[in-house]
Image: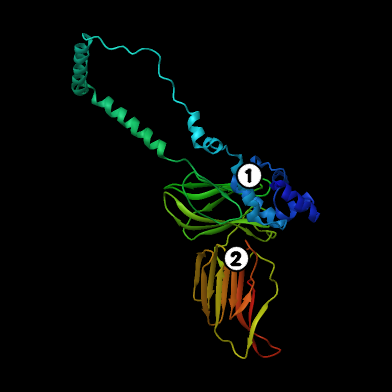
Amino acid sequence: MKSIGEHLRTAREEKGYSFDQVVHDTNISREYIHALEEDDFDFFPAEAYLIGFLRNYSEYLGLDPSKMVGIYKNFKISEEPVPMDLLLGKKKAAAVKKEKPESSVEKKSLPRWLIPVLAVVVVAAGVAVLFIPSFLDDGEKTDSTIEEETTSVSDEQSGPKEFFLTEDTLDINVSNGDSIKVSTGSRLLTFFVSISDEEQLISYADPSGNPGEILLEQGGEQVVLIGDQTGVYFFVKKVSSSGATIIAQKVSVDEPQAGEEPEEVVVSAIPAASADTNLTDKIVIMTETYPKAYTIDALFRGDGLFRYETDGQGRIERFYQAGERLKIDVNRNLLLWASNAGSVDLKISGQEIKIGENGQVVVRSVKWVKNNETGKYELVIVPYN
């Protein structure tokens, strides 16, 4: 049976892909690609990274990601030692565990004169147990008790947690001292959580070493660039002095323009969140003599934040999970924003519309515009500028 590395290497060679091409197309570092093809699983900082890279590389090569992950898990199981019961059978295993032979030393009975002496000793010991503790120092007893309780509590408390962001969305509860680690392809970028009565924030240093902060405010959101066209999207669901619930997700973004800050892109307002270039031309959905109301139907095939604004009536936003649906009745204009555009199946008045790719942040405007040549109105969807 082929190993994981043999499957990957064979598929890559059959397609004629070089290491340089794979690294460029997948954004996975050469060292990790080499480790996968050599079955060097200990090279990865955590199993979550191994499985994430294995899924991405397998899909890139046209292999079944689930099947490849299954091969890895079977390999991991095969590395574990087999229980003795399975190797020998229960009866043989039991026979191996022989009881120790009884001592050959002949047992001797106690002399009769020793029995009354032992009885006196036992009674004296009982009296000591009952009365001597009352003469002990209460302070020493309290100190001992406090020390034991403190040790017990400290043993139960868990230390700071580490979370690893791969291709999946993290929906996590964090507290002071926790960290979120993200791979940039060649290194790990760490976000440190600091939560106390004085401050609630996430601090980090970008790939260039520049420091940055993300303020933890309920409903706040921010994208931090970790590559030329890759960022990490953070959304704060709730926060308190003891912890916070946040969503973290990798997204695709445009390269920063001249004069823009390179380390972060604030997406707290819809107009500032446009981060895609695939849809540059308008799509005409339907043509009517006069504008009329229409319906938006959305099916979410993956997790992501979705926000919309209809006819200037205020923004509505929510984090949707895979399998959920949304229906929006619109009179004239709609502005929508998605953090994971490829996971949204959108229908506008029954017509299927693709608004972006997986992990892509997009902003779209759906509106009626008049065609001066025909004199009729067209319902169009265009990138929001």
Above or below, 197 against 312 in this view is above
Residue 154 rendering spot, x and y as whole percentages: 40, 36
* Residue 245 horizontal side relative to residue 33, left or right: left
Image quadrant where residue 119 sits = top left
Few, some or many residues within 10 Å of mark 2 (<14, 14–19, 20+): many
162 or 40, nearer to the observer:
40
Residue occupying image coordinates x 71% and y 54%: 26
Residue 315 rendering spot, x and y as whole percentages: 50, 71
Q: Which one is in front in this view, the residue at disc 1 or the one at disc 2?
A: 1
Residue type highlighted by circle 2? Ser
26 or 121, nearer to the observer:
121
Q: Is residue 205 visible?
A: no
Residue type highlighted by circle 1? Phe
Image quadrant where residue 150 sits = top left
Secondary structure state at the residue bearing disc 2: helix
Above or below, 26 against 31 in this view is below
Identify the residue under disc 2: 343
Residue occupying image coordinates x 48% and y 61%: 219
313 or 70, nearer to the observer:
70
Is disc 1 in contact with disc 2, using a CB cutoff of under 8 Å? no
Label at residue 75: 1
